Image (cartoon, grey):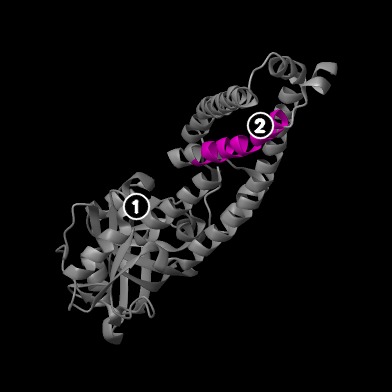
Amino acid sequence: MQLGTYELMIDNTVRFYTGHLGIHQEGYWEEKILDNSFEGGNQVPVTNENITVMVPRLTSFALSSFGDRTRGVMVNGIDPERESVLTALDKKIVKGRYLTDRGSLIAEGLASYLKLQVGDTLVMISQGYHGVNAAGKFPVVGIVKFPVPELNQQSVYLTLDEARSFYGAEGLLTSYSILLDDPSVTRQVQKEVEKQLAGTGLRVMDWKTMMPELVQSIELDYYGGLIMIYILYAVIAFGIFGTFIMMTKERTYEFGILVSIGMKKRKIQAMVAIEVFLLSLFGVLLGVVASFPLNLYFYLNPIRLTGNLAEAYEKFGFEPVMPFSMDPVIYYDQGLVILFIALVLGVYPMLSIMRLNSVKALKE
């Protein structure tokens, strides 16, 4: 559940903000202004077999207004077709239609605050490229809903052409967001893209660099979870140790007879070692088999939070849901750790047999 939550947080960040990789003009990430945009057109500047899509954006801020209400908004100039691949924006429409031509998509929370409906006109003013005045009226063609509250309160989407015209930034982009087929190759793809963009003045950043706060929060929570796991390991270890003590004590008389009739202690130890190994191995396998269906159920049907707890999650900018991860490493790592603990504790029966006194054993 913990790792599933991390995966959801990362996926939300990648798909709603940054992509696995982002391409920007040098200096843009430190100072996100239109003057730090770059000549982008609509052409993809790099190629790589691991790239699913590269999404061009022109992003800036504006003051939006409708009637007597105003609010600061984040304006995203997008290529609607490519954007839908990265963010599935077309699947988040709750009213109206998807963005195809002139007009605007606005987030549900923003629409509620401004009391806007589909068909109304959103007014925006801002400062454009190189300080030009930016002002425009945009009919609302659709309303979208995001699971991330921050996005739901301030997002406005225009087509790239509309955004460029609004800001006086013809042919310019502020970023390319890159979605990869396999997140595990992010670093490898980053190096290859950097080579392709050498000398262009563009910078390639991965999502960890662009979202250090998310990385830090995940690491902090992860180490807190490790403490709990270690406590559980200790509890499990005592349970296994108790089983081995019982197994040894109950068979002391049996071991005494075997030694008395001439059986070597090392052979008894070998027999018990095989028993300990098989007991531990089948115990681990049984644990995996028993937990897999339950984990799979919650993976397919994540726990959705409600009430005050859901509100608390949303205040921190997280979707109020607790998903489960099906990463094979979870089973692999836990199985190996428990098997290792069991085998280490299996030394106790070996030592007991080595110190066995057959006379005393026969009296028990």
- 10 Å neighbourhood of mark 2: few (<14), some, or many (≥20)? some
Location of residue 240 by image quarter: top right
Q: Residue at x 25, y 59 (%)?
A: 55
x then y, percent, for residue 191:
25, 65
The N terminus appears in which quarter of the rendering? top right
Where 212 sits versus 244, above or below? below
Per the image, the residue denoted by label 1 is 184
Q: x and y percent of residue 314 in the render?
A: 57, 54
Gap between marks 1 and 2 measured at Cα? 44 Å
The picture places residue 171, in percent across and down from the top left corner, at: 17, 73
Q: Is residue 356 left or right of residue 74?
A: right
**Among numbered discs 1 and 2, the one appearing first in the sequence:** 1
Q: Nearer the viewer, mark 1 or mark 2?
A: 2
The amino acid at mark 2 is Met
Residue indicated by mark 2 = 350
How packed mark 1 is, by other alpha carbons closer than 10 Å (few <14, some 14-19, many 20 or more), is: few
Q: Name the chief secondary structure element in magenta.
A: helix
Per the rendered image, the range of residues in magenta is: 333-354
- Is the C terminus in the top left, top right, bottom left or bottom right quadrant? top right
**In the image, what residue type sits under mark 1?**
Ser
Above or below — where is 265 with respect to 332? above
Residue at (71% x, 39% y) in the render = 235
Is disc 2 placed on a helix, strand or loop? helix
Residue in the picture at 53% in, 54% down: 318
